[in-house]
Image: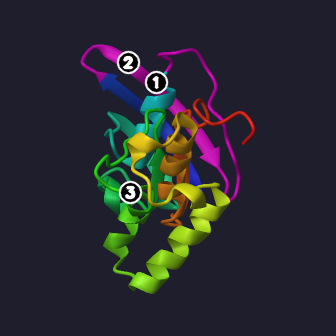
Amino acid sequence: MSTIEIRKVTKRFGDFVAVRDADLSVGAGEVLCLLGPSGCGKTTTLRMIAGLERATSGDVIIAGRRMNELPPEKRDIAMVFQFYALYPALTVGQNIAMPLHYERLSRADSDARVQKVAQIMHLTGVLDRMPGQISEGEKQRLAVARAIVRDPSCFLFDEPLSRLDVEL
């Protein structure tokens, strides 16, 4: 895992200031939770770290490297959103494997990683089902599995536990 820092980050949408002069430092391997009321800038901050939003001012630094100008795909970050975005025409297994297509892994390596993550996320019994055929909790676990399978340097989660099955 990599370090994440934001230094004096501000995000404006026109005259509205969503995030003002935020500073944050997360060490490698640390877990940090952002808590606050709806609309206080938590999601916007995560989106700036991921590169989905550009900071109006300030710096986003990951693993000691300034990321402000890098697109999301160059940041080696996996983000799981509160409202998962699954591919409805792909099976659960294919959804998990989708990020691996860009890594150009062999079929055997890809299958092994999918199986390992499916086991961790308790999804092995539904790998051949379509997203419309699984529970809300399984859909959320699928979204988390799709992030984990990449083995990125950082994970960002935006309320990923809100739909998980209680027993998990």
Report if residue 139 is visible in the image. Answer: yes
**Label 1 neighbourhood size at 10 Å, few (<14), some (14-19), many (20+)?**
some
Q: Quadrant of the N terminus?
A: bottom right
Q: Position of residue 9 (x, y in %)?
A: 45, 35
Q: Amino acid at mark 1?
A: Arg
For label 2, the residue is 17
| Image height of 43 relative to 99, above or below | above
What's the distance in space between the residues labelled 1 and 2, CA to CA? 6 Å
Q: Is residue 50 magenta?
A: no
Residue 36 magenta-highlighted: yes
Check contact, mark 3 vs mark 1: CB within 8 A: no
Q: Residue at x 53, y 41 (%)?
A: 140
Tell me where the magenta segment starts and ends, as one range: 13-40
Q: Amino acid at mark 3?
A: Thr
The image position of residue 109, as x and y in percent, is 48, 83
Q: Which residue is mark 1?
A: 20
